[in-house]
Image (cartoon, grey):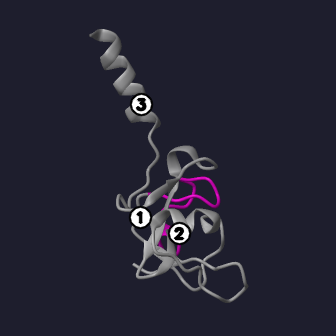
């Protein structure tokens, strides 16, 4: 029983900080500070750091996210176009693309 408690404590401490629970979590590169990404109204979107970057400076690795609830639509394969989707997993190829516009709250 003690081993189970220790195991669950470690798993909880190692979980990524992906705040949009209806989306997938991009935690491979960022560890604890992973960004959520998924399909929103037919387009791929991701959590991002816009205005919150000023408030959270130094608290997360560059290119990663915190618990700040900002998001953006992701750029598709062609520059200037949005990545389209019908499911969250359709967005996996675009999860590391830049925002196609500013972060929104």
Residue in view at x 59 percent, y 79 percent: 83
Quarter occupied by residue 101: bottom right
Q: In this figure, which residue is indicated by the disc labeled 2?
A: 49
Q: In this figure, which residue is indicated by the disc labeled 1?
A: 68
Check disc 2 and report its element: helix, strand or loop. Answer: loop
Where is 9 relative to 57, above or below? above
Q: In this figure, which residue is indicated by the disc labeled 3?
A: 11
Residue in view at x 41 percent, y 64 percent: 68
The stretch of residues the image draws in magenta is 50-66
Give the spatial CA distance, label 1 vs label 2: 7 Å
Tag in front: 1 or 3: 3
Of the numbered discs 1 and 3, the one sitting upstream in the chain is 3
10 Å crowding of disc 3: few (<14), some (14-19), many (20+): few
Q: Horizontal and vertical percent for residue 92?
A: 58, 62
10 Å crowding of disc 1: few (<14), some (14-19), many (20+): some
Outermost residue toward the top? Answer: 2
Q: Horizontal and vertical percent for residue 15?
A: 44, 40
Check disc 3 and report its element: helix, strand or loop. Answer: helix
The C terminus: image quadrant:
bottom left
Where is 71 relative to 15, above or below? below
């Amino acid at each position: 029983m003690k081993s189970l408690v220790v195991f669950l404590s470690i798993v909880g401490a190692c979980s990524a900080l992906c705040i949009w629970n209806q989306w997938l979590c991009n935690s491979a590169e960022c560890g604890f500070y992973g960004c959520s990404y998924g399909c929103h109204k037919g387009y791929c979107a991701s959590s991002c750091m816009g205005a919150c970057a000023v408030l959270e400076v130094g608290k997360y690795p560059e290119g990663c996210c915190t618990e700040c609830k900002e998001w953006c639509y992701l750029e598709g394969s062609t520059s200037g176009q949005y990545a389209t989707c019908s499911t969250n997993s359709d967005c996996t190829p675009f999860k590391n693309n830049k925002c196609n516009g500013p972060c929104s709250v």
